[in-house]
Every structure is written in structure tokens, then in C-alpha cells.
Amino acid sequence: MAKKAPFYITTTLPYVNAEPHLGFALEIIQADVIARHYKGLGHEVVFNTGTDEHGVKIFRKAEEQKKDPQAYVDEYAAKFHILKDTFNLSYTDFIRTTDAKHKAAAQEFWMRCFKNGDIYKKQYQVKYCVGCELEKTDSELVDGKCPIHPKYEIELIDEENYFFKFSKYQQPLLDLYANQPDFVQPSYRLTEIRNFVAAGLQDFSISRLKSKMPWGVQVPNDPDHVMYVWFDALVNYISTLDWPQNEQRFKAFWPGIQVAGKDNLRQQSAMWQAMLMSAQLPTSKHIFIHGFITVDGQKMSKSTGNVIDPIALAKQYGQDAVRYFLLREFPFDSDGDFSHKRMAERYTADLANDLGNLASRVSNMVAQYCEGRVEALESKHAGLTKAVCADTETFKFEQALNKIWSIVVDANQTIDREKPWTLAKTDIMKTKVVLTALVADIRLVATLLQPFMPATAQALHVHFSAASISKMAPLFPRLDAKS
């Protein structure tokens, strides 16, 4: 059998100026599904995440709390690392932009762009949003404020900075999009970034005066400047692969797949790609842009008090219940709305009643009517496997789960129709045939669920692959019993 190609997927790096929120939990769970899927197919997988730890927001937050910036980011990086156990994540690499290897990689990347003639210094004046860590034109402002971060005052920067020749890469970027029409997905996001690039690109600042903002990666050969946070942070996607020290590992896994929110479209699919071209490195493979989560119809915001803590949510409902809800309710290519009411409805109907009840009923009846043993049988739904895999690989997670749940629903309907508890009184052989088929369905469900709900899939595998199937406790206790 031919060896499978190495596979690389990465999330963006959350900015560590606040606690983890549900939007990033959605992104990292989506990436985890893909990583688990390819690992299950036999690929060697690198799954990267981490934390973005430089920039003016971090520096000011640390000052506000009278903390050393490094101590501040150490504290918040640990909070994001907690998500691994909270949601049973399979990431292999956790890069921090304060890691020594990352800073060294960012400096080498800078030098390659500089040697290619794409970095220069000039005096400039610009309107700047601290929240976005991006320059803003008047057309991007609403009533003089950034619409994404209206609580921040727009600042005027007037200083000498280094700039990156973004304008030089307008045509190369347009060629990239034309030659690889699935480069950014969904397709309407590719159209959006193509239109942005076609309208003309402005060179952007990639440094800050160290005297004003010392918290950043040192610019090579210039002690007066540190790197602008976006330039440094984007390099994480290759520094995590030990570039440039380990060319063998880098070439094995790069280019890879990136998962990002729609507010990162410009940075990931244009700025980063131009920077890679400048450093004469391969561009990314694919960029999947996911939507945002609103809460009861409103954007999540600390000011409105509706920020959802994913860790608290997992404690309330369980890790796999939250994974299932986010993947089933929030198609990657569109925004979605969270409510505890909807979460409770999904939990009760799909998990407790449909899947949990199916597993309990079948295990109880196999133990009672088959002495805990059934022969191995292929499920009549095995033909769905290929379609579920195809949906998974194209980030259509809700469609994949719909197909898996069609097996669960059909199995429950079979139980209601055949009534094995009644059938056993007159035809024990037919009862065993019915239960054997139901166990085959549950085993298939366990296999297909592995990337989506790994703990649940493991529990089903262990119980229903056993030589002797015993009665099974509920997988998803009633919510009133949990509280």
C-alpha cells in the first residue's frame, strides 16, 4: 500500500487579550474534525494552533494590569491551552509567537523579504484601529469609528516605519486566485478577496518604533524597530514546522490548509500569500473561511454581557455535546446563532433521545435476548461512508452529521416497528437477526462519528465491539439529571 502524503492543517492564532470565546472554539473544533479524519485515513498529520502574543493591545493590557508583558501572555496562553482537554482536541503543535524558534523564523522571513527588495522605510501618517491592529481608510470607518471595534478610538500614527511592498503583488495574487479557483472557500469569499485585490493594493506598515511600543519581535539590523504584529504572527504557520532550521519537515508538510474567520480574510488570503511570494516560499494550499457566532441574535460582546465561555459550556453539557452542536448548527460558510434553548433542544432530541436511547435500548436487548453476543455484519447503510467522508473533507460538517443521524433515526424506527421485546416471545431467531442488524448500524455510527464526537465514538466502539455486550448506561443523561 502506498504511503499517504503528510497532511497539515492550522487554525489562526487567537490574540491573547481576552478569555477564549465560543467563536474560536468553533474554529478549532472544525479543524480538529479534519485532522482526525485524515489521521484516521492513515496520513501523518500536523495540526497546529497556538497564541498570538505581540502588539499594542497586549502591551497596553499588561500595563493596565501592572504586569510584565511576558507574564501576561504566559497566563493567557495557558487559558487557551486548556481547550485541548476541554474539547478532546488532537492538535500536535501549539506555537506561541513569543517562542524563541518563532522569533528566529520571523527574523529570517523578514530578511528574505528584505533581500527581495520588498521592505523599505518611510515616514507616514495613517488612521489606525488598535482592535484590528490594522490601518483604516475613511471609507472603512462609520461615524469615525471602526465598525468591528467601535469601543476603540481611531488613533493617528505619524512616524517612520518599515513597509512591505504589497502593491507589487496585485497581479501575482490575482493569478493565484485564477489558477486555483478553490484556493479560498466558500467561493463567495474568493470573489470578495479577488475584488479587494483587483481594486488596488496599498503597501502596509510592518514595524513600530520600539520607543513607543517595545513589545514585539526585534527587526533585524535595526534596534529602533520591532515588527508589526501581523507580519510576525503570520509566520507562525511555518515556524511551527521548524522552518527554516528543519527544511525536511517544512517541505514534507507545507503547503497546508488554513482555517480562519471572515475577519481574517484579507490577512490570510492576500497579505500572507504576498509575503510568502516575497520570501520565495510556496503559498498556502487552501483557506477555509468560517462564519461568526451571534448569541440570541446579537454579536458576542463583553459590553453586552453575552460572551459565551466555551469551557463553562462544556462543563454544563459535556464536551461532545458542544462539539456536536457547533458542527451541526453552524455551517462553516455562514454565520449562525447560539442560544441555550436551541442547545438544550439539540441535546435532548438528538443526543439523549436519538443516539443515547438507541445505544441503551439495543445494548439492553442484546444482553437480554442474545446473551450479549451478535455476529459481525455490515450495516445496510455502509454505502453512506463515502458520502460522509466527502462532506467532511469539504467542511460540510452539518451535512455529514445529517447523514450519520439518518442511520440513528432509521435504527430507532426499526426498533419501534419490529418491537423486539414482543417479537422475542414468538420468534427468538428473527429477534436476533433484527438486533444483529441494529448493532451493525451502531458500529457504523461509531466509526463515522469518530472525527466529530471522539469520546462518544470510542465509548460506542468499546461497548459494541466487545465479545459480550452488556447493558449500557445512558451516554447523555437528561439535562435535569446533570444539574
Image (tube, rainbow, N blue to C red):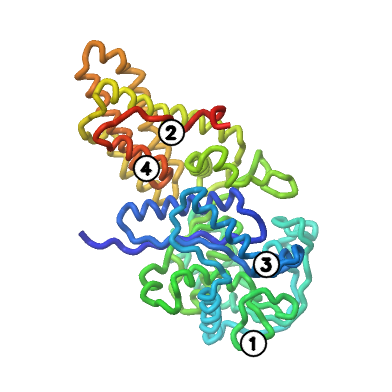
| Whether residue 160 can be seen here | yes
Please identify the quarter of the rendering in which residue 210 is found: bottom right
Q: Position of residue 387 (x, y in %)?
A: 34, 43
Q: Residue at x 43, y 50 (%)?
A: 33
Residue placed under numbered mark 4 in the picture: 458
Dot 4 falls on a residue whose secondary structure is: helix
Amino acid type at circle 1 is Asp
Q: Residue at x 80, y 57 (%)?
A: 143
Distance from the alpha carbon under mark 3 to that under mark 4: 44 Å
Dot 3 falls on a residue whose secondary structure is: strand
56 is higher (above) or lower (below) than 303: below
Q: Position of residue 12 (x, y in %)?
A: 54, 61
Dot 2 falls on a residue whose secondary structure is: loop
Residue placed under numbered mark 2 in the picture: 475
- Of 334 and 254, nearer the camera is 254
Distance from the alpha carbon under mark 3 to that under mark 2: 47 Å
Distance from the alpha carbon under mark 1 to that under mark 4: 54 Å
Disc nearest the viewer among 1 and 2: 2
Q: Position of residue 153 (x, y in %)?
A: 79, 62
Q: Earlier in the sequence, mark 3 or mark 4?
A: 3
Distance from the alpha carbon under mark 3 to that under mark 1: 23 Å
Residue placed under numbered mark 3 in the picture: 134
Residue 222 is tagged as: 1
Distance from the alpha carbon under mark 1 to that under mark 2: 59 Å
Q: Residue at x 75, y 63 (%)?
A: 65
Amino acid type at circle 2 is Leu
68 is higher (above) or lower (below) than 381: below
